[in-house]
Amino acid sequence: MGEKSYEDRHESSIYGSRLLIHRRGDIEADTYFFRAKITAVRGYVRRSCGTNDAAKAMVFAEGAYEDLLVRHKGGFSLTELTVDKFFYDWIERKRHNFTASRAQWKRSVYERYMSRYFGKQNISELNKKFCDGYWEYRLNFWSTKEGKKRIELNEKRIGAKSQSSKNVATTASFATLKAEASLINEFLRVATEEGHLARTIKISAQDAMAKNERGDSFRDTFTEHEYQVLTSNLFNYAMCRGKFADKRLHSLHKFQRLMMRAFVLLASSTGMRVGELKQLVWGDLDVRTGDDGEKILVVSVRGETSKVRRGRTAVAHSSHIIGVMDEYKEASKHNVANDLIFYSEQKDGSLSTVDLSVSFKNFLRRCEYEGREEGLRLSKDGKARTLYSLRHFYAIARLKQNVDVYQLATNMGTGVNQIRNHYGRHISGDAFIKELTKFESKTGEKTKSAAVRKLVDMVQSGVLDEEMALDAFRKVAESR
């Protein structure tokens, strides 16, 4: 920057010529900038003070200079770092902490919306007001010129994963916004820990959506009858029969249909996460014989493929899935122990994980149900179904059958509290009481049962009174 660019210069009374504020003659703006010199560091650090008031600019500059001195002493970089660069560096450095699918999810969510808002900003200059402004940008995105253009381009893409704007959720759900807030808060926390931010900034999805617009935040699932219709259609789809018959289908398309059926039935039979299913290899499946002589499919979920980074075994609910998987394995060209079960084959012959999400949504649209325009894609309340709806169907079906809550949580790789929080309304009152009291003595049975019944009523109603809940728990504890 030439000397002519320095106008209205003021040196710091504390740091002298090592820190000065000035206006820039090369741009049409009254805003002050500061120029800082750190001993033993080549060049200068230059940043905007964000104000045209000289006194305020100097206060800002001196505070920033002190932060720079601390960062230099701690060995941190003093150069400007964009949020884009910080985010991708963070994902790369910490990739061993995430499963491959989780890391990809973080990248995809960030690139879909966040990069366009945060990406070019200097990570060290983020503030609460700017971060909170993300919600206005996010909620209005699809009505902007950029959003409309993206839908238009999406519909014109040849061979696109999604060629219809029907697969674009132009109205975000509260659950989606909570997931985005979680990711933003995660990388802002890391930025603070690494010295890029002076203090932690947090945003909340509650600021984005009024309480009466949030819904219950539960993913939709299928009713038992809807699931019967789904599986009936799925069989015809895989066998290319009835309305799913198509003479234009070649061998790859037919195999992909078999893959879809195997994936859906395995998901609804084990309750596994989508990311876990996508990374299964044939060696993870084991058929065992139970005490009653019944064949049982046991799936080993490896820690490195699990969202929670803990390995476990998932037992399939029905032995029917064994025949389905055997049939699919016979049709697959890649069926040795280390081969991916569900895969996409590249031109060079290598295998990668497959994304069946859009194919599943399109399949659901073709499943006619009660005259709904979108078939089984949407519930009667208009809530969208995804592959994750199969995990929820599994959990709810098992709870309605009074399956032990602790065993269910273990099989699904989650916590008991998560099961109760997400699916407690589907647990029968008697089953809930049995779970909470099965290790208790018989003394104080009436008091205890009444207290537990109060907890059950609150869970099933979806309204939790903390004071009443604590009182109920206290009575349960006193009756031990």
Image (cartoon, helix red, strand yellow):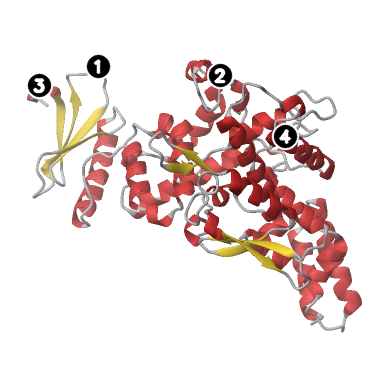
- Of badges 4 and 1, the one in the foreground is 4
Q: Earlier in the sequence, mark 2 or mark 3?
A: 3
Of 227 and 42, which appears nearest the observer? 227
Image coordinates of residue 293 in percent, x first then y, are 76, 69
> Against 258, is 147 above or below?
above
Q: CA distance from mark 4 to mark 2?
A: 21 Å
Could you say which quadrant of the image residue 446 lies in?
bottom right
Which residue in the protein does label 4 denote? 383
Which residue in the protein does label 1 denote? 28
Image coordinates of residue 416 in percent, x first then y, are 68, 63
Asked if the residue under mark 1 is in contact with the one under mark 4, i.e. CB atoms within 8 Å, the reply is no
Q: Earlier in the sequence, mark 2 or mark 1?
A: 1
Q: CA distance from mark 2 to mark 1?
A: 32 Å
Which residue in the protein does label 3 denote? 4
Seen in the image, is 251 located left or right of residue 447? Answer: left
Type of the residue with mark 2: Ser
- Of badges 2 and 3, the one in the foreground is 2
